[in-house]
Image (cartoon, helix red, strand yellow):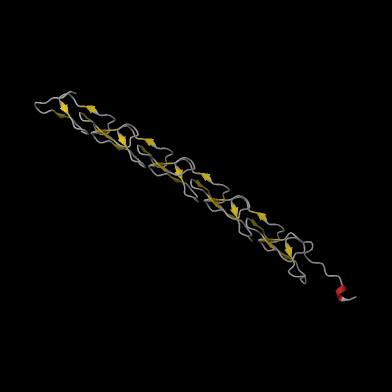
Amino acid sequence: RSLSALPRPASPCLSSTGAYQPSAASSSCHSCPAGTHQGREGSATCATCGGGTYSSAGAALCASCEAGKRSDAGSSICDNCDGGAWSTASASVCSICEVGRWSGSGADSCTACDAGKSSDAGSAACDSCAGGTFSRAGSNCTQCGSGFYSSTGASQCIGCDAGKRSDSGSSTCDVCYAGTWSNASASSCQACAAGSYSNAGASECIACDEGKHSDSGSPTCDACHAGTWSNA
């Protein structure tokens, strides 16, 4: 019989998955390296695992990364998403948390910030809103309007009391000066009309007594000069 007629030796990888035979002349079967796989028997090469999957050495198939993890192609493990990011299962990249939301390492979703707090995109924690601002859950910190105020970490703004006022974005309300007044939630204090006066922090002006008078915006009433008079 000629040599060509002799039966060829069986491949050492014919009954093995997760392995490869480098060449037909090779007498050994090699395990596929980590990050690759081979599901067919007798293969000459191993295939690279795609992004979002991984494998250990000798794998017949690549496994999917769990939610909260990701991988590049050819990976032997999956990495946790960083704080401020998240992923679904089989992800090759982690998605950034939106403004007003946050996550810790290895998260499969982002969590809304509590009311009175907020965050930038990609944040691992929420920060309290500054005085003069407020937020609802999962939203930006927003300035209080004029006539309102807030302290740090506020979920809503509070109207100024009567006799006080504020500009937008204020953490406190200012007392109206003597000679002026305001209603509640006022952005400005109004001057008392002529013939009336007020003390500081007034919610209304007081009419001058008989025999006294005042100009507009006066903190007191003055006695009428000799030879003059006034009603109350």
| The image quarter in which residue 217 lies | top left
| Whole-percent x, y for residue 71 in the image | 61, 57
Q: Is residue 159 left or right of residue 33?
A: left
Compared to residue 18, the image places residue 96 above or below, namely: above
Quadrant occupied by the N terminus: bottom right
In the image, farthest residue toward the right: 1
Q: How many marks?
A: 0
Relative to 143, 107 lies left or right: right
Q: Position of residue 188 (x, y in %)?
A: 30, 37
Q: Nearer the viewer, residue 216 or 180?
A: 216
Up the image or down, 133 lies above or below 22; here it is: above
What residue is rendered at 25% in x and 29% in y? Answer: 205
Q: Quadrant of residue 232?
A: top left
Q: Position of residue 156 (x, y in %)?
A: 42, 37
Q: Position of residue 151 (x, y in %)?
A: 38, 40
Residue that sits furthest to the bottom in the current view: 2
Vertical placement of residue 58 versus 229, above or below: below
Residue name at image x 40 percent, y 37 percent: 157
Instruction: Out of 207 and 91, give the one closest to the viewer.
Output: 207
* Residue found at x 70% / y 57%: 61
Residue at the spot 82% in from the left edge and 67% down from the top edge: 10
